[in-house]
Image (tube, rainbow, N blue to C red):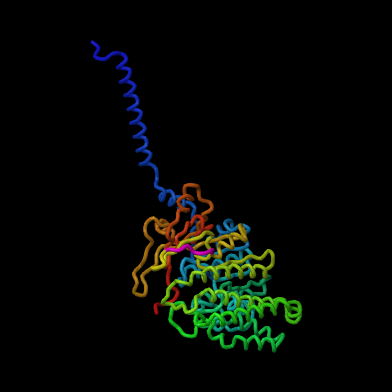
Amino acid sequence: MQFFSIERRQKWRSLLVRIAAALTLTMGSIAVAIAAPSAESTVSTWVQRNLHPVGHVSPMEKDDFRDLEPLRAMIGEARIVSLGEGMHGVAEPLEFRNRLFRFLVQRMGFTAIAIESGIAEGFEVNNYVLGGTDDLAGVAQRGFSFGFARLPQEADLMRWMRSYNDDPKTSRKIEFYGVDVSGNETDMTLPLQIALDYLKKRDTNKADAFRARVANLLPYLKLDRIKEASNQYTELTQADRDRMTSTVADIIAEFEIHETQWTAATSRREYAVAYRAAISARQVDSYLRWIPIGWKPKDGYAGMYPTVASADHTKAENLEWVLQQMAPNARILVFMHRGHLMYTPSRIHLPPPVGTVTLPPMVGMYMKQRYGRENFMLAHLFAEIPAQCGRPSIAPPPGTVEALFSAVEKPSFLLDLRSAPRDVTDWLKVDRDEFGAPPLNTISVGNAYDALFFTRSVSPVLPCP
């Protein structure tokens, strides 16, 4: 006895087949979803398999550098290696900078280092490492701007460079350069003084006349962005600012029209340094002119934004000059905060009422544009700011690059981001907040850097005040 016709049975059979197929597909999708690793798990696995452990961060007297050898392939033929510290005032990036520089000099033929310090101040440091006055403490105190003179790693770097240059086996001496805007919160006149001192040897009357034009303005060439202070550049009138600008321009013109005579009377090197000091005086003046008349630290970041653009353009301009002073095949290590060296724009989060702003082009963007593959950028990331000075320990929030790296068993390592497969690259190229001291940058790590130097934690260089 048949309850359904053949036609109806065929329809039911077809429906059951479709349901079974759908169930099979659904169960298969669920199984794949359960089995498929998360994006972070994929990245973590790739990092574990491709990292290069760093045996020790600090320099050693006798170092075989075996743990740094992977950098040779990463760097390749690049003539500029940039190391970006993750935070000012902590020991690990400074110690590693000094060790990395030794490796680059002794194993890869590098001949210079340029750091985020005033260019005019750096001239005295370079004179010391090349065998000039034997006053390490004094030169270290005068040769670094923005408080970096207090860091013992700067004196360690100077001491090693001089020792290396003094060694009779050294065939090519290594040099030191600052590339930042010169000066600090108490005095920004050094480059102008260097230029005028040189000019006085060539033409006393003109040098004295230039000094007289701006003598009453020199005490105002300073800017404290933190503390309320008197006699600062922001108190000058527009007419005073213009007088300073025109005087610096006239000094530069004097150098330019007498280049051949003055070079012959002194030397190509002495003239080049003095002329660069004059250019540096113009950089100082340009930087200060961006600050509104009457600005006070209580006004906050308002009005200060253009100085960031001016300072980073100055760094790039000075680095280009440094490279011009070097032999065509010479190679250099550049050391700054990683925020200056990134290849891409970034956003920072500032206190109200400013909020989140996009930063202007940083020096790393200029370097990428000008030198392309001749530049290799290594950024320092870390995953803990330990408790200090009454403040609690701070760790990166979940989902950040640093949080993922903190789970890796190696406390410090190198990682070439350019070798990552597509799925890892996609994760690395998402914009995220970088962990560190505020204000925090929001960037795409995969786009901003070539490679990473990671340490699980950082430690302060100086004791609590």
* Front in this rendered view, residue 2 or 285: 285
Q: Quadrant of residue 250?
A: bottom right
Residue 434 percent coordinates (x, y) = 44, 61
Q: Is residue 357 magenta?
A: yes
Q: Position of residue 174 (x, y in %)?
A: 63, 71
Q: Percent from the top left, x then y, of residue 350?
A: 41, 67
Where the C terminus falls, by quadrant?
bottom left
Q: Nearer the viewer, residue 401 or 461?
A: 401
x and y percent of residue 202 in the render? 72, 85
- Give the position of the N terminus as an image quadrant: top left
Residue 436 to residue 32: above or below:
below
> In this rendering, does residue 158 appear at all?
no
Question: Residue 21 lies in magenta, yes or no?
Answer: no
- Left or right of 360? Residue 351 is left
Residue positioned 47% across, 72% down in the render: 303
Left or right position of 26 against 362: left
Give me the residue at 32% from left, 15% from top: 7
Residue 29 visible to an observer of this rendering: yes
Quarter residue 386 falls in: bottom left
Residue numbers of the magenta segment: 356-361
